[in-house]
Amino acid sequence: MPAVNSQPRRARSGNQRDEGARLAVLHAADDLLVEHGFARLTIEAIARRAGVAKQTIYRWWPSKVEVLLDTLIEDSEKRFPVPAEKSAEDSIRGYFRGFARFVTRDPAGKVLLALLAEAQHSPETAKSLHDRYLGPRRELERDLLARGIEAGEVSPKLDLDATLDAVVGPIVYRALTGASVPRALVDALFDGLLKP
């Protein structure tokens, strides 16, 4: 008689995924979110747009939130990475300007805003968003600021997390409410909170 495995069943690691199908699903989810919004986004619609079976998506992702998170992570790394080497003032200021562009103009930024909004109603989404995207990205952002401090380029008036919240918060608020985020606003936040 075979032994019963008492370990919970793990999600597939992803090595067996067809890369073309995976990318088609991520692009379809991103496009459909922008076109129809989070509430009207369904796994069925993603499957139809991507040209894959619904079961394929469920085999790889347990929910549309996880599909969107993979889209957000991949797109952020490609189009809006946290600078890993430079710590100059211009690099940090440029990062926050880039963040403002990301959440107001980039489809992946719209994914971030949709997940932030959904996280207000779903503790599961909030946890997954924090664990998979916000937390790891915050670590990279802290490192960016710490390098700037060490180089004498910036001197935050608050601790690193409070500084990041104070700069990013108004940008996200304006983006969530559909307002523009002028470069002058980003520069004023940077100058007021990070300049020596």
Image (cartoon, rainbow, N blue to C red):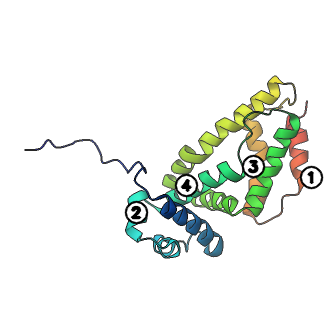
Q: Compare marks 1 and 2 and give the one earlier in the sequence.
A: 2
Residue name at image x 91 percent, y 46 percent: 188
Question: Of residues 53 and 108, which is closer to you in this image?
Answer: 53
| Apparent side of residue 131 relative to residue 116 in the rendered image (left or right) | left
Question: Between tags 1 and 4, which lies in front?
Answer: 4
* Mark number, residue 58: 2
* Mark number, residue 70: 4
Residue 170 pos. (x, y %):
79, 52
Residue 165 falls in image quadrant: top right
For disc 4, the neighbor class at 10 Å (few under 14, some 14 to 19, many from 20) is: some
Q: CA distance from mark 4 to mark 3?
A: 23 Å
User: What amino acid type should be assigned to the residue bearing mark 1?
Assistant: Ala
* Mark number, residue 184: 1
For disc 2, the neighbor class at 10 Å (few under 14, some 14 to 19, many from 20) is: some
For disc 3, the neighbor class at 10 Å (few under 14, some 14 to 19, many from 20) is: few
Residue name at image x 52 percent, y 65 percent: 25
Give the structural element (helix, strand or loop) at label 4: helix
Give the structural element (helix, strand or loop) at label 1: helix
In which quadrant of the rendered image does the N terminus lie?
A: top left
User: What amino acid type should be assigned to the residue bearing mark 4?
Assistant: Asp
Residue 142 falls in image quadrant: top right
Q: CA distance from mark 1 to mark 2?
A: 44 Å
| Apparent side of residue 5 relative to residue 151 in the rendered image (left or right) | left
Q: CA distance from mark 1 to mark 4?
A: 32 Å
Dots 2, 3 in contact, CB < 8 A: no
Residue name at image x 65 percent, y 36 percent: 139
Question: Of residues 112 and 127, which is closer to you in this image?
Answer: 112
Question: Of residues 32 and 134, which is closer to you in this image?
Answer: 32
Q: Compare marks 1 and 4 and give the one earlier in the sequence.
A: 4
